Image (tube, rainbow, N blue to C red):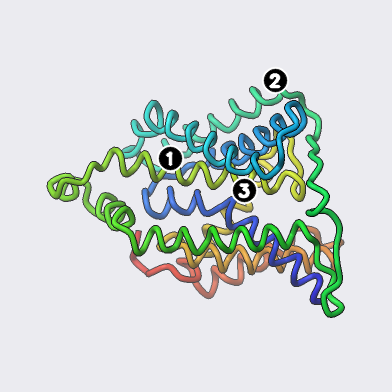
Amino acid sequence: MLTILFDGIAYGMLLFVLACGLSITLGLMNFVNLAHGAFAMAGGYITVIMMNRYGISFYWCLPAAFFVTALIGVLLERTLYRRLYKSSHLDQVLFSIGLVFMSIAAVDYFMGGQQQLISLPPELRGRFDFFGVGIGRYRLFIIVLCAALTVALQLALTRTRFGSQLRAAVDDGRVARGLGINVSVVFALTFALGSGLAGLGGALGTEILGLDPNFPLKFLIYFMIVVTVGGTSSITGPFVAALLLGIADVAGKYYVPQAGAFIIYGVMIMVLILRPHGLFAREGGR
């Protein structure tokens, strides 16, 4: 039971890192970016190429996946996304879904449609027993790393000058510009942060989730569930939602495998019946 709980927490932490970038762009920037999974896929393929073709250490691949994907996010934000900030959500959805199918086709053409595999460092393989609980080394690594990222992200968005500028830019861009805030730069950096976190999540998830060209579509619904259940007014909501859904998914697949993904959808429905705006969302908020 405790082993299942541990694996569920690790899976939830991974889901949070993958989905929190979408929470940032949707909740803080009010932009519906359904191509978020494509950035996660990019981080995964960056890791695969660096490790399998060039023999670079897995530990160096993680920051590379973050920064390269963040750079891709900035380039797309400057050239494409910024033109749609004031468009309707339908336009944003159609545009970002189009990017998803373009990315799938491009990856399938250049990398092939087969599942990609990586070999973790020896110290991250296998399990060890801790007071009778089987703990996977790689899952423990994910929990520690993702917990540190969560704390850093929460502090950055709530306790720093940049976080204050971002909230001001979203609430009223014209007033923010009048106060000397460069709204364009703030949005670009925020989009880069969200894209980079998705890329990092994709790199971390390659071993657990698998990686192929259909990754953005396969896990898009999971990202949306985390953001919907948690709400978009803070980072806390998606974090708790990701843990809840990760534990429910792992436990459900272990105890009632015939139910498949029904468990995670059932949890989503129950939460939204009780909290239609999400676990920690403010009613009437953005």
Q: Position of residue 270 (x, y in %)?
A: 61, 71
Mark 1 vs mark 3: give the one in front. Answer: 3
Q: Nearer the viewer, residue 212 or 71?
A: 71
Residue annotated with mark 2: 110
Q: Position of residue 52 (x, y in %)?
A: 77, 31
Residue annotated with mark 3: 201
Residue type for callout 1: Leu
What element does badge 2 sit on? helix
Residue type for callout 2: Phe
Q: Is residue 176 above or below residue 137?
A: above
Query: Which badge, 1 or 2, is on the more N-terminal residue?
Result: 1
Which residue occupies 54% across, 34% down?
68
Query: Which badge, 1 or 3, is on the more N-terminal residue?
Result: 1
Which residue occupies 53% across, 30% down?
99
Which residue occupies 60% across, 45% down?
200
Q: How many marks?
A: 3
The single residue placed furthest to the top in the displayed view is 109
Q: Position of residue 114 (x, y in %)?
A: 81, 30
